[in-house]
Image (cartoon, rainbow, N blue to C red):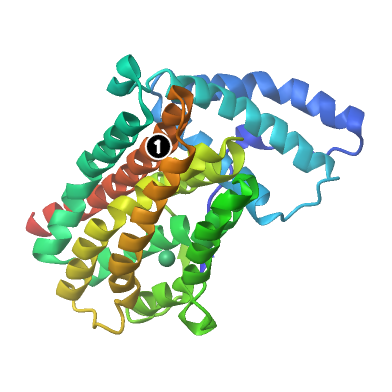
């Protein structure tokens, strides 16, 4: 599989040949990039938001997968320009965060409220999941879903690895247990990225060029931000904890949907496996949160990561559901 994500022209710049040249490129591009981010995050401009997600996809993956040396001037330029985007996004996102428990704060109240926010989130009954559970998808719709799932989820194990870099030593064991499970628990052929491909292979092979929806790019960017870029391991703890806590209910519906679409138990093992595995991981994540949540700032950082990933996953489901919906309407017409 290849993933094709076009780079918007606003983010293209010549190859810098010196530090002086790199600084002049940043000076020339930063105002345009910042203006684009303001339109995207503060003014609700959907085209600008889409452009930002495309740019972040490339620059974030470079950061996560270490595909350029740290001494590269071009990489430095990309990081500085990427950070101009993230500054605007952080300001916009954090200004919307609130918790009732802050009025009379105790860590116990905060944990209780955070868990309730995750369990009550609209992701638990997203219309795409309800539709899949009730009706299944056509083979074309299944492929479209899997294309976009692959694009956002292909490096999930690297989010856990990235999160471990900033997590305090005594909290790392749970992360590495999770990572061990992701990579097949000692059986490499059962690593989750490979189990995922079994659903794919049954629907005509994996020799395709994927053009992901912007919702899939946004979900990937959100996971990379909170686990690698936020500078606060509590953000990543919230992101992964909220994800794992809500995953079993989603996976049950997705499994039922794929089975209804005609896939066999062998082909849907990825979805089946995550029902029980994420129940364990979700509980463990909330146990870890109890150890680190001491102040209102800790609670807000966990909420920031947790809510961001659940909202982004909903946006991802929305983008798939919109095309499923259109497809059904088109067939009915
Ligand atoms: Fe997994």
Q: Which residue is mark 1?
A: 308
Task: Point out the quarter of the image occupied by ligand 1.
Answer: bottom left
Q: Nearer the viewer, residue 331 or 50?
A: 50
323 on left or right of 38: left
Report if the beta carbon of the residue with label 1 is closer than 8 angstroms to ligand 1.
no
Q: Position of residue 258 (x, y in %)?
A: 22, 71
Count neighbours of disc 1 (C-alpha within 10 A) and say few if under 14, some if 14 to 19, many if 20 or more: many
Q: Residue at x 45, y 72 (%)?
A: 192
Disc 1 secondary structure class:
helix
Q: Position of residue 117 (x, y in %)?
A: 26, 36
Q: Where 230 falls versus 165 (above or below)? A: above
Q: Residue at x 51, y 83 (%)?
A: 187
Asked whether the viewer can see residue 211, the reply is no
120 on left or right of 47: left
250 on left or right of 228: left
Task: Quadrant for the C terminus, please.
Answer: bottom left
Q: Position of residue 17 (x, y in %)?
A: 90, 39
Residue farthest toward the top in the current orientation of the protein? 103
Asked whether the viewer can see residue 245, the reply is yes
149 on left or right of 90: left
Q: Where 44 falls versus 211 (above or below)? A: above
Q: Position of residue 264 (x, y in %)?
A: 24, 83
Q: Residue at x 48, y 68 (%)?
A: 182
User: How many numbered markers are drawn?
Assistant: 1
């Amino acid at each position: 599989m290849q993933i094709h994500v076009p780079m918007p022209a606003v983010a293209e710049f010549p190859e810098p040949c010196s530090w002086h040249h790199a600084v002049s490129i940043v000076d020339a591009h930063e105002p345009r990039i910042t203006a684009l981010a303001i339109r995207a995050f503060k003014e609700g401009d959907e085209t600008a938001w889409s452009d930002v997600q495309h740019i972040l996809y490339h620059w974030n993956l470079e950061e996560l997968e270490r595909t350029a040396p740290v001494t590269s001037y071009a990489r430095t330029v990309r990081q500085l320009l990427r950070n101009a985007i993230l500054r605007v996004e952080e300001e916009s996102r954090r200004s919307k965060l609130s918790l009732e428990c802050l009025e009379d704060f105790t860590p116990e109240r905060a944990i209780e409220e955070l868990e309730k926010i995750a369990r009550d989130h609209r992701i638990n009954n997203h219309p795409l999941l309800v539709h899949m559970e009730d009706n299944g998808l056509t083979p074309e719709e299944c492929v479209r879903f899997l294309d976009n799932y692959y694009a956002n989820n292909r490096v999930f194990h690297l989010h856990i690895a990235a999160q471990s870099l900033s997590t305090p030593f005594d909290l790392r064991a749970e992360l590495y247990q999770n990572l061990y499970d992701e990579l097949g628990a000692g059986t490499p052929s059962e690593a989750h990225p490979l189990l995922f491909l079994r659903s794919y292979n049954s629907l005509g092979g994996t020799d395709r060029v994927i053009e992901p929806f912007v919702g899939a790019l946004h979900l990937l960017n959100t996971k990379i931000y909170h686990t690698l870029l936020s500078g606060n391991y509590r953000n990543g703890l919230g992101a992964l904890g909220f994800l794992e806590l809500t995953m079993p209910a989603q996976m049950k519906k997705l499994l039922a949907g794929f089975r209804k679409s005609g896939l066999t138990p062998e082909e849907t093992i990825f979805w089946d496996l995550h029902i029980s595995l994420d129940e364990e991981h979700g509980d463990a994540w909330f146990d870890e949160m109890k150890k680190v949540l001491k102040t209102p700032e800790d609670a807000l950082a966990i909420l920031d990561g947790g809510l961001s990933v659940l909202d982004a996953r909903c946006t991802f489901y929305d983008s798939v559901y919109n095309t499923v919906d259109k497809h059904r309407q088109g067939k009915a017409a």
